[in-house]
Image: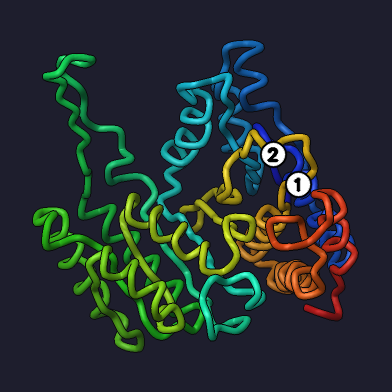
Amino acid sequence: MRIALIPGDGIGPEVVGQARSALARASEVFGLGIEMETLDLGAERYLRTGETLPEASFERLRDGFDAILLGALGDPRVPDNAHARDILLGLRFRLDLYVNLRPVRLLHEAHSPLRDVRAGDIDLLIVRENTEGVYAGLGGTLRAGTPGEIAVEEDLNTHHGVDRIVRAAFELARARGRARVTLADKANAMRHAGALWRRVFEDVGSRYPDIDREAWYVDALAMDLVLHPRRYDVIVASNLFGDILSDVAAALVGGLGLAPSANYAPGGRALFEPVHGSAPDLAGTGRANPFAAILTAALLLEHHGHAAAAAAIRDAVEGAVSAGETTPDLGGTLGTEEAGRRVADRIDSNRA
């Protein structure tokens, strides 16, 4: 398996370095034969050359690798984030990575703001539509910069796009033994988009009689997710609603430092990234939490059929968290590199 590494900006290179170590250790322990190559894409290249995602680089990513691991993008020296938009959104849209999967699992009760929860009590999958919605970039402005300015952001929903993401959610539920799929929408206020999502959800869901289904308004769901997180298995949502709910859910299990994600099209290429962003204020301090990137590496392996190696990495992270071998955001005293090393040292085939 060939993996392209895009360390990116801010803390990206630091956390990707630790994810790379975990992948190398898993490859050694499980005999996976993983090859990794680092690509020069990000703010530094953009500031140096004016290039964001050259066509040659895109073609290499599309044709020359089995998976892409991205650290983070975003740099205050590029205030409009042109490079981040072209690279991240460009890859999502051009490779049609329409599934954004964000697993959420509580590893240790000490890291949840909720009372009376234990490790494993919160264990859900958020399946977010990744190529449509308000993130499609449709709209415009009129009379910008004047008191009469008008800004229009359009919410694009197609039957094709909704059908395939809902189907992906039910397929994930079935594959992972989950009992229920919950739709998050705002059908009471967004009548047209809401009607499409609900109609497709009922149609697709009826073909999975072994899986329960329910639909919630997103605001009520956000509240109930905090009050009763145990009851959720799989949540499917539009681009915007899925983005918001995944951050709410991440806060319940320890924050974005433990939040992995995958962007993929079933049977096609895939891009994996920790959710936390580039955090430029932490860059170079050694305080960045590498666990989200390492858990993202586990998600990458699982997606490509290496379940035992993925489980070993997740077990190693959980072991480090339980032992308090963490960065300061989780109450520990370790730096980024040392925390990553503790995880890599724990990766063992006997624990998978």
- Label 2 crowd (10 A; few <14 / some 14-19 / many >=20): few
- Residue found at x 82% / y 63%: 343
- The structure residue drawn at horizontal position 39% and vertical position 60%, both measured from the top left corner, is 245
Distance Cα–Cα, label 2 vs label 1? 6 Å
The reply to whether residue 6 is visible in this rendering is no
Q: Secondary structure at mark 2?
A: loop
Q: Which residue is mark 2?
A: 282
At label 1, which amino acid type do we have?
A: Arg
Q: Nearer the viewer, residue 215 or 89?
A: 215
Q: Is residue 204 left or right of residue 312?
A: left
Q: Residue at x 46, y 33 (%)?
A: 90
Where is 336 relative to 166, above or below?
above
Taking the spot 29% from the left edge, 69% from the top edge, the residue there is 183
**Mark 1 burial class by Cα count in 10 Å: few <14, some 14-19, many 20+:** many
Label whose residue precedes the other's in the sequence (2 or 1): 2
Q: Amino acid at mark 2?
A: Leu
Return the x and y of residue 312 as percentages of the image width and height: 77, 72
Q: Nearer the viewer, residue 131 or 226?
A: 226
- Above or below, 19 against 228 in this view is above
Quarter of the rendering containing residue 187: bottom left
Q: Are marks 2 and 1 in contact (CB under 8 Å)?
A: yes
Tell me if residue 256 can be seen.
yes
Picture coordinates of residue 34, whole percent (x, y) = 79, 52
Where's residue 5, x and y in %? 70, 40
Look at mark 1 in the image and give the residue it sits on. 287
Q: Secondary structure at mark 1?
A: loop
Residue 279 in picture, x, y percent from top left: 62, 39
* Apparent side of residue 127 relative to residue 53 in the rendered image (left or right): left
Which residue is at the front of the view, 283 or 115?
A: 115
Q: Is residue 137 left or right of residue 259?
A: left
Which numbered dot is residue 36? none
Q: Quadrant of residue 257?
A: bottom right
